[in-house]
Image: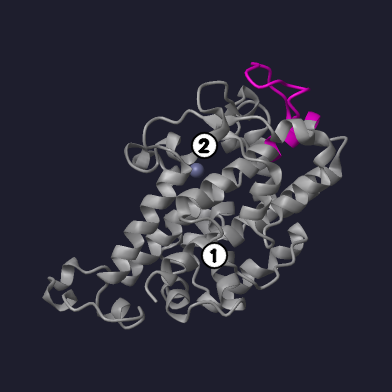
Amino acid sequence: MNQRTHTWLAIRAIALLEDSDGPKGLIKILKDNVRGAAIGSWIPDLQDTKIGSGDIDNHILKMKPYTGSNKSRFIKKRDVLFKELGKERKVCEFLDGWDSVLGHAWWNKAYKAEPRPGQHLANRSMALTTTLIDQLILGDEKVASLVPGTVRFANKLDKNARSRMEEVSMYCFMLSHFVADSCQPCHCDARKLSGYSNGLHKEMEANWSKIVGTYFDKKKYLANTDASHDVLNKAREIDAKFDIQFSKVVPDLQAKDPWLEIINICRASFAVASVLVPPNVIPYGEESKTSFKTVFNTRPKLLKDLNRMVMHDAVLNIAILWNNIWSKLE
Ligand SMILES: [Zn+2]
């Protein structure tokens, strides 16, 4: 996703936490820093971070059919995945609606990614969630006044060693980047057609940022002086452009930990990529490319459904992951 889409998704997730009566302390940390820390939502895409979390392999989990040993470990049946993703996410509804494209045989096969060691969306998200829990436990007085419970040794720390609200907030925004990337189908499909400059990926993202509009565009947003309350309202206004209705329910993490949750989200995104360009049109392992026009021009409903679903789930998933961090402290 592009910068302005990432920024909107994260800010919209703060508004969703507010609308769903989420944890007040967490909302305050994020909302008070909605202008200063939002840069965190696109930092992982900046060139200077490429030696850190910005390394491109951290932004993907590209799957393809797997034929090696222990195959059953890499089969995720449709009903099992849908159950583990829960009722609030729209991706299951989307896949249900376009079910005839994939069929049962597709779901009964093994699929696996071959990431570079340690580098993929689930690893990155897990690392950040654990770091954020530490940051919140070791927060300075302002953070400590919002976090439930007391940390007995916190006052023994050098006060400059304790994390500040701005810092915690920026890392939350950084986490939002990786959660949102896991909802982009092209980030989860190993076919060449899903590569950034191969006709579909970049164009899908340009389409999203065009719909999001310019309020959250980098230059403009960095100079923004609106009150945080108004920024959140601007984020809510964009729902209508995607025809999204949020249910104001943010469920708990459905899987056992954030790592498994992101793996499941990526698996669903891989299925979505396989709906957009079915394997009987361009088989896995084939080098052919396609184009945005070829995929969507004759299927406008597919594009509308896709946009609504990806944006809804990205916002919800960010809120779920943030909430989960906070729930560990309670
Ligand atoms: Zn990214």
Seen as rendered, the residue at the extreme right is 298
Q: Give the x, y percent position of residue 95.
A: 76, 45
- In 3D space, how far apart are the residues under numbered discs 1 and 2 (Cα atoms)? 21 Å
Up/down of 35 relative to 145, above or below: above
Residue 49 in the magenta stretch? The answer is: no
Mark 2 highlights which residue?
Answer: 61
- Which residue is drawn at the image coordinates 55% and 51% (left, top)? 180
Residue 279 in the magenta stretch? The answer is: yes
In the displayed structure image, the side of residue 31 where residue 154 appears, left or right: left
Image quadrant of residue 294? top right
Q: Nearer the viewer, residue 80 or 41?
A: 80
In the displayed structure image, the side of residue 129 where residue 322 appears, left or right: right
Instruction: Give the extent of the magenta segment.
Output: 272-294
Give the mark, 1 or 2, whose residue is nearer the N terminus. 2
- From where the camera sits, is residue 324 visible? yes
- Which residue is drawn at the image coordinates 16% and 75% (left, top)? 153
